[in-house]
Image (cartoon, coloured by chain):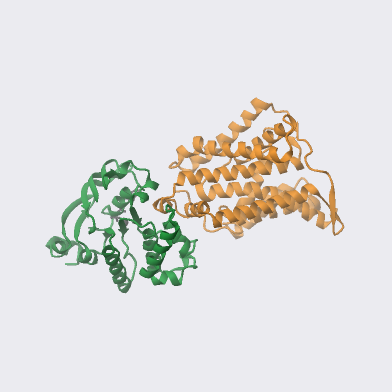
């Protein structure tokens, strides 16, 4: 494989990270919390898609939609039950709760579906196109395409709709948003819904590329995407997109040109260097403390 | 129109408002003056729902606001310009103004009100596509006021609108408050700048460490020896 192939696979992996990172960054931007259970929503999304495809024999699009619906509801329920009661609590309590939710989901999945790995069915045709001498699979193209569509749709939503305007207002100043008559609790719910729906999309793309479904599936992509969100500037939507793509590319290049074992270490080393030079991440603004 | 009855508000163990009562009648400008830390902002926040009072009533046209969800208070016709302006710095002037009209569905009337706001504050019209964070302090105050007017409130609360502004701008802001009132909006004005506030107010209350210690017409308090000594520089 040549440089171009590595670049494209990096962008593809990065696209998945970017879609997950959007969930972290939106929730951080609006609820000012790190939702460490976000990765486990991906896992639930993967199981839902798996059963929809394998057991109910649904085609890929309805299976993905079902997964989106379930994850969206799950995200809203998690927020309502676990985080909303802590709206005025310290950020440490919220963080610990989020970690608790994460374990709850992982262990719940283990009890219900056992810890044995399920094999995700092949959902995309295995063909490929060749581009400048490199052969690029359909899945890679679809993944990058979906990420671009998600990013464009989200940007339009945030910038052009009334709810989007309310979300931007909440992320800047919740008190002032209340004075505008904005129902902040509702906006936080919407944010969790969108982030979790995106997690479902990411889960299908992820399982199409790495077809194993197991209860801790979400942990590693979750932490990588979180890193990507911080890398790009947590709270910033373009930052999550850029951070995700860069992280994917760095990871694949590190694997290809340096060492498979060291690739994660290299990814985190790059993150540390970026944060030393620019503590708010690539596109981040001032980081607000949760008040 | 607005009546506060025996309001108590605290932050944890510290009681910041220790049982105050006052009222604002239809069409009036009423001012609440007091030194820094007296509890003016706390009272404003309790009225607009940003803080829940411990006890007492906040009656707006017969309805107790302390039992209304905070984001629904604006719909009842009470709008607040918060202390420190709290504009949305990352959004444009126009986006800020439309956020002020967030609760409205009457597009045409909203656009009319936007024109009215632009007439009141021509500077905002010039800068309508500019990011609000790039405005000067005076312009930000005007934006905060314009934004609060975009909901077409029947009563407007202003928390220290003159804070940090040059004397010239302060005069301008007070002139505009008077104009807003003359157009039919009732005003509750909180100020440390007691002299200017008393000049435009119909009635006034003096707040000292969480208690109302004096009340009267703007004129009476301007000439009161205690007010002169404490708030008007002797
Ligand atoms: N968020 C807060 N937490 C704790 N104490 C506060 C808070 N805000 C204000 N206070 C206290 O409440 C009192 C009244 O403050 P405030 O209402 O801001 O006064 P003013 O607006 O008249 O300057 C002060 O003693 C202040 O220190
Ligand atoms: Mg104050």
- Number of on-image labels: 0
In this view, A221 is above or below B177: above
Q: Colour of chain B?
A: green
B129 to the left or right of B74: right
- Position of B108 compared to B48: left or right? right
Relative image position of residue A145 (x, y in whole percent) = 72, 52
**The image quadrant in which ligand 2 is located:** bottom left
In this rendering, does residue A269 appear at all? Answer: no
In the image, residue A219 above or below residue B206: above
| Position of residue B93 measured from the top left corner of the image (x, y, whole percent) | 46, 65
Q: Nearer the viewer, residue A47 or A34?
A: A47
Q: Relative to B226, is A181 on the left or the right?
A: right
Q: Measuring from the top left, give residue A117's x and y in whole percent.
A: 74, 31
- Up-down: is B19 above or below A54? below
Question: Which residue occupies 64% across, 55% down?
Answer: A152
What color does chain A have in the rendering? orange
- Which residue is pictured at 27% across the width and 52% down the height? B39
Residue lying farthest right? A133
Residue A119 visible to the viewer: yes
- Provide residue B27's location: percent of width, then percent of height: 24, 58
């Amino acid at each position: 494989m040549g440089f171009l192939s590595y670049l494209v696979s990096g962008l593809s992996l990065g696209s998945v990270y970017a879609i997950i990172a959007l969930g972290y960054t939106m929730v951080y931007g609006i609820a000012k919390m790190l939702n460490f259970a976000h990765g486990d929503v991906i896992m639930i999304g993967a199981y839902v898609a798996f059963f929809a495809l394998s057991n109910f024999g649904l085609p890929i699009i309805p299976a993905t939609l079902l997964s989106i619906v379930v994850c969206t509801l799950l995200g809203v329920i998690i927020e309502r039950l676990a985080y909303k009661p802590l709206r005025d609590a310290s950020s440490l309590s919220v963080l610990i709760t989020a970690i608790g939710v994460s374990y709850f989901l992982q262990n719940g999945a283990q009890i219900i579906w056992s810890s044995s790995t399920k094999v995700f069915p092949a959902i995309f045709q295995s063909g490929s196109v060749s581009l400048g001498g490199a052969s690029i699979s359909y899945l890679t193209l679809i993944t990058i395409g979906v990420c671009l569509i998600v990013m464009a749709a989200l940007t339009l939503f945030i910038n052009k709709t009334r709810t989007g305007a309310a979300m931007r207002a909440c992320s800047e100043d919740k008190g002032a948003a209340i004075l505008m008559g904005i129902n902040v609790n509702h906006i936080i719910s919407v944010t969790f819904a969108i982030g979790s729906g995106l997690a479902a999309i990411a889960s299908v793309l992820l399982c199409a590329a790495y077809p194993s479904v197991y209860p801790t599936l979400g942990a590693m992509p979750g932490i990588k995407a979180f890193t990507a969100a911080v890398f790009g500037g947590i709270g910033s939507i373009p930052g999550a997109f850029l951070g995700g793509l860069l992280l994917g590319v760095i990871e694949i290049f590190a694997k290809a040109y340096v060492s498979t074992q060291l690739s994660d270490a290299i990814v985190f080393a790059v993150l540390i260097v970026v944060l030393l030079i620019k503590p708010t991440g690539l596109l981040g603004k001032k980081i607000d403390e949760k008040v | 129109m607005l009546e506060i009855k025996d309001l108590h508000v605290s932050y944890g163990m510290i009681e910041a408002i220790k049982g105050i009562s006052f009222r604002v009648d239809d069409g009036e400008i009423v001012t609440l003056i007091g030194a820094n830390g007296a509890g003016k902002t706390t009272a404003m926040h309790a009225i607009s729902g940003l803080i829940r009072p411990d006890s007492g009533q906040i009656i707006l046209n017969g309805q107790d606001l302390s039992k209304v969800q905070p984001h629904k208070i604006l719909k009842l016709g009470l709008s607040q310009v918060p202390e420190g302006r709290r504009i949305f710095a990352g959004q444009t002037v126009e986006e800020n103004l439309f956020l002020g009209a967030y609760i409205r569905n009457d597009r045409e009337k909203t656009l009319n009100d936007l024109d009215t706001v632009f007439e009141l504050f021509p500077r905002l019209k010039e800068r309508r596509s500019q990011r609000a964070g790039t405005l000067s302090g005076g312009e930000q105050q005007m934006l905060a006021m314009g934004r609060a007017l975009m909901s077409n409130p029947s009563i407007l609360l202003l928390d220290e609108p003159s804070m940090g502004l040059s004397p010239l701008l302060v005069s301008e802001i007070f002139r505009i408050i008077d104009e807003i009132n003359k157009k039919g909006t009732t005003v509750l004005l909180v100020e440390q700048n007691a002299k200017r506030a008393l000049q435009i107010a119909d009635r006034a209350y003096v707040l000292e460490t969480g208690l109302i210690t004096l009340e009267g017409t703007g004129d009476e308090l301007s000439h009161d020896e205690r007010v002169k000594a404490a708030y008007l520089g002797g």
